[in-house]
Image: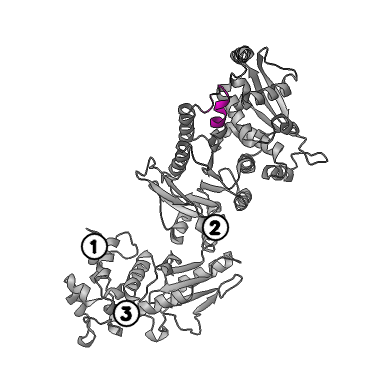
Amino acid sequence: MDITIPRNKIHNRRQTIQVDNTVLTFVGQNGSGKSALLESIFQKYLDDQASTTRVISFTSGFNECYSSQFNKSVKSRKRFVVKNPNDETRIDNAINAFFFDSSWVRFLVFAACALKPRGKVAEFLNTKNLISHDANGIDTSTYIKFPFRVRYYYIKRIQNALAREATDPSFLSVRRTFFHDYLTKVAEAVYSSNYEFDDSIIKDERRINAKDLLNILGNDINKIFSFLAWSSSKDDFIFRKEAKLFFGRIELNDLSDGEYQLLSIFSLLDLFDDSDTIFLFDEVDSHLYYQNVQKLWSCFENISGKIITTTHSADSIILNDFNNIKLVENGQVVPTLLADTILKRLESLASGLDYKMQVAGKVRYIALVEDYFDWFIFKELSRIKVPNFDPTVFDRIHYIKCPSNWDQTSQEFGGAKVNWVEDFKKQNTQPDTHKIFLLCDRDNLPIADIGNSGLVNRAPNRQNRIPIPGQGGNRMAFLLSWKRREIENYLLSHTMLTNHTALQPIQNLLPPNDQLAVNNSNDNENVRRLDVKTALQPLYLKDNITGISTTQRGVDFNKLKTIIDEIPASEISEDITNLYNFFSNNL
């Protein structure tokens, strides 16, 4: 499902959002534009009166933008102005793009209790022993109280309508709408069974039991909530904000903030979920502790409609399907989300290794690399070198930054990456992960210890294949290495360096027989072992930066791509092809 939305208050262009699965979750820093995106989606459907998609927006807090958007739409389209039956269709469809705030929660939960006895609200309340049932499973303990009135102006409208109808039977008035019909039924239920609108009703608190709602208003959810929106607009008949909802002696306010939030969301799903509904939930997991967050995301997996939500919760990120998460920056959805980005996001949300490893366990293919700089060079060189290069090989693999931390005297080769895998195994007994590629700088590892594919050879204290848990398939972590000192060495090209008058300093470091040559991949040990960072960095660093060691922030990736594009395939090492093939063959 593609949703093309107008510009928002942060991003000044239209954009199309793909909602492929049931849930789409936006993550990002405060002020990144997550809520702005939801507001833009809501505005699209507020404006599109012909759409058959129903959009239900909800926040349990105070969202000025949603409220302002909705109120402007109500006013401009006269959503709840009822004069005669011709207005019914317009107002009946008002629920097709509707904003529910906290003032609606009691009526939502009440309706779910009354009309959905096997729904999510009833199930939750049953587990808390908050409601009772009769022999037929009907809720006998839930009821709602609310101030109700019928003002004199409305009595005059009805009397005038009756007078007109007496002389003109075809006259259409509010008296012939389902709104008046529902109002009549409510007045008969809470005030007098013989009420005929011959006198006004003074504002007073009234009560309806959940077991009676079906008999009073039926089960047409759209009509019920269209009626409630009309009747509570400007507190004409029902004072929605003053309602109280009881489960026996327990009022909704007596429950915790988390229980309130769950019941709010569950009631919306019970009442409005179908294949044509999109739910917009801003910070849906606010006030929830871990067990309730679990209940929430588990519930989302089994709905018919779509949910678009935002979160700041590390727990929610972990419980999400990784493919359902989208990063928002400057009001725009970032097209591709990498695991490394999510792990960095988790560092700002929660401390501890557990969170990060559990998220990693949702990723099918992982590459542990020194940083994005390495992964970028590998991908761009593969694009030039490999016949029939398939970019989806890299698209399917999520890189995660992890140093190798190896020296000959104190640590095993790739020690930090191997330790990462062991921590991963401790936190994931049944991960979705199938393969982890531990791609290391060679540094001073003997060339004889690296196979042609890039797989490091086994040694007495070194595994090159580490089994990872999970059912089905050959799940494995592979210890790999460049055959050159580090990734920068693969940028050594006679043609490219000549273009930038940077060839001679490199040639001066090499014996005559091993110097760089045109149309030669230069796969000799002297080239492999060169430390060339200082010589090459001026070609790809941002202006006014003279050197970087452990950060990629100084890299100008446009410059880097430009110099890589100048390298002929014939001057790129076969190591690149061999490593690409190893990755591809293990997906």
The earlier-in-sequence mark between 3 and 2 is: 2
Residue 2 percent across, percent down from the top left: 46, 51
Q: Nearer the viewer, mark 2 or mark 1?
A: 2
Q: Is residue 547 left or right of residue 88?
A: left
Which residue is labeled 3 in the image?
573
Q: Which residues are magenta?
A: 79-91
Above or below, 523 against 318 in this view is: below
Q: Is residue 169 above or below residue 345?
A: above
Occupied quadrant, residue 235: top right
389 or 295: nearer the eye? Answer: 389
Residue at (63, 39) in percent of width and height: 260
Which amino acid type corresponds to the residue marked 3 in the rendered image? Ser
Whether residue 131 sits left or right of residue 365 in the image: it is right
Q: Amino acid at mark 2?
A: Asp
Rendered position, 139 above or below 23? above
Q: Are marks 2 and 1 in contact (CB under 8 Å)?
A: no
Return the residue at label 1: 546
Q: Which residue is mark 2?
A: 321
Q: Is residue 192 on the magenta stretch? A: no
Look at label 1 and name its amino acid.
Thr
Identify the secondary structure beneath mark 1. Answer: loop
Is 315 placed above or below 7 here?
below
Report x, y in % for residue 469.
59, 71
